[in-house]
Amino acid sequence: MATPTKDTEHFDDLLTCTICLEIFKLPKYLPCLHTFCDSCINTYIVSSVAKGKITEGFTCPVCRKIVSGGDKLEKPELWAQSLPSNHFVTSMLDKLAIQKAEKMCDSCVINKESTKAKSWCPICEEAFCDQCEKYHKNLKISARHKLFSIQEMQSGGTPFKVCEVQNCEDHPGKIVEFYCLDHSQPCCTSCGTLTHRKCENVTSIQKAASGIKHSPKASGLSQKLTEHVIQLGEIIEDRNTNLADVENSTGEIRTTVANIKTEISRHIDRIEETLITELTSTKKQVEIEVKDEVGVLSSYRGAVKKWKTVIDSVLEHGSDEQCLMEINKIESKISELEQEIEDLVKTIKSVSVVFSPSPPIADFIKNAQTFERIKVDKSAVSFLNFNLEMKVDKVDFRTGNINILQVIDVCNGTGTTSGIFIHNFLLFTIHNKKKVVKYNSDGQSLLSELALPGSPEDIAAVTHFKVAVSSYGQGVCVVDSNKMVLLQTLNLPGIPVYGISFVNEDTFIACHSYTLTWINVSSGQTINKRTTSSQSFFVLSLSQTDYMFANSSNSVDYVVDNTKKFTYTNSDLSYPRGIGVDYMGNLYIASYSSRYIHQITNGGELIRKIPASTIGIVNPWTIRFATNSNKMVVTCSSTGKATICEFV
């Protein structure tokens, strides 16, 4: 029997029902985008009704969001039938069955027969045995459908694109053929006639979906989901650490009480018992509160991870149309989820249990009637605004003006610096003083600084709470950007590091001289290495497989999957250094010697050359944009200054 290929073997979680923990059968999804077997969700709904848990709807078994019953309140057994089918998951299951040589003829299955399928119709999304294939070809409506041999599909000779034909969610049985740009909605012919007939910008679904997989919108959504997974994980880790601190502090209090008990008379036994009871009750209450927070955050994280898996799988395996539809579904839920998380995070307090014994004066037995009361201290924890909005006011990066918001004299008149936006802050390296400094987001106030073991060269984001600082000859330091403390020092003997850019949380690219080196953060082991043709001071990682670097004194290479996508060169590009990218995918190259910033498309075409003098810089060194923002920070190598600018 054939074994599943790498195409589907990593998506078991995506294809497994969280109720029965088995492969989906007739997958249906709820408005919150969680998917379940038709029979499982139906049983769950009916059971909830029987237990009297439902008044206006039912709650999702995963995230507990309420799903309205609409006009079916009196007949809950019909709710599951009205839920939309998850066509992407169904197609993935078809693909898995084909790869395992387990796919049965769909027509025969309807007739309760089991016949192995021999061919596949991508239009009907059905498999046929030899006999049913003949009937399919004889029907006028399907006579021109091109069928593929399942045997060839198993061998890899014929590609399998899931969900090449999409069904309309509002009109089951209708095929999505159009896309309304005015409302960002896919449409069937009924939608176009009834709902969107007055819309001016309606195009074909194929045209609307063209290039969606490689668009900033798709990559931005995938990146945003990754960031949410990481940030939720860090918040959960903080909550669990707080819980452990409470456990430790209550243990210390017990020890203190026991020591006091041994030094005084029996009179203490009564009030000790009262205190221990109160302490236990307080600890239990704190545990309930913190665990509730962890539970809710875990639920959010699970939802985001599930959406992330869907997006990654549809980007890799789905058709352009499916990709567009899945993005539409998830995008509509992101803002709501972000608001819920932001509201929750704002209410989180750092919890500690504090004990201070009342003054045990000489006459304690005679006068003291109780220990000091147990208190729960709650102080706000700075999670630095969870909300990571993808959408900002529309900005034309290619023709818009550039305004200087603030010029910061980071190095006091001389030296090199690299800067980065991280949360609501700005971090800069100061080479000659061996430290990294932290400013508020507008650059007007120096908040804190941290001494480093070596002279820093470049700085890059690792996660929402961590940055990495490179140091030539000293390796890489990982810093908590919130608390400004050194977390890890990664020594890299034999690897001179100057510029640094993270591919993901575990891997970064280091560059210097004529070498790019991919390094694992945890172990410091070299994963990959590439030789360049010239001094490559900086590198920009755009995705898991895309990166950009200087490959000569007047050219920059863009590489995708180890294949050069383009080389950008220009007579006014002299000694390229830092490389940046805005949220629309436009690229920016700091031309150190010719004193320009070159703005180019992600296809390598020049948009415009921005004179460094117009933004208060002499020799541009690094360029970094704030996440999903029109703001950038540009540093100068000769003056040690940094300029915060915005496109308007």
Image (cartoon, rainbow, N blue to C red):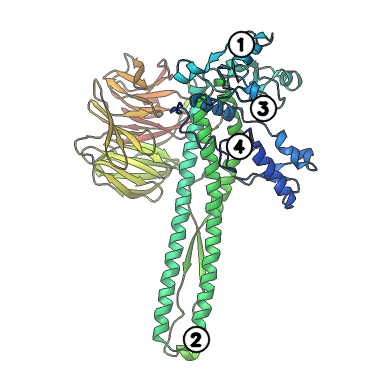
Q: CA distance from mark 3 to mark 4?
A: 26 Å
Label 4 or label 2, whichever comes before in sequence order: 4
Q: Are marks 1 and 2 in contact (CB under 8 Å)?
A: no
Q: Amino acid at mark 4?
A: Thr
Asked if residue 416 shows in the view, the reply is yes
Q: How far, Cα to Cα, is label 3 from label 2?
A: 83 Å
The residue to which callout 1 is attached is: 145
Q: Amino acid at mark 3?
A: Lys
Give the CA distance from mark 1 to mark 2: 92 Å
Say above or below: 230 vs 316. Answer: below
Q: Earlier in the sequence, mark 4 or mark 1?
A: 4
Mark 3 = which residue?
Answer: 112
Name the residue located 51 percent from the left edge and 82 percent from the top edge: 271
* Mark 1 crowd level (few <14, some 14–19, many ≥20, 10 Å Cα): some
- Provide residue 483's location: percent of width, then percent of height: 39, 51
Which disc is residue 368 wearing? 2
Q: Looking at the picture, which amino acid does disc 2 mark? A: Ala
Which is more foreground, mark 3 or mark 2?
Answer: 3
Alpha carbon separation for disc pair 3 and 1: 25 Å
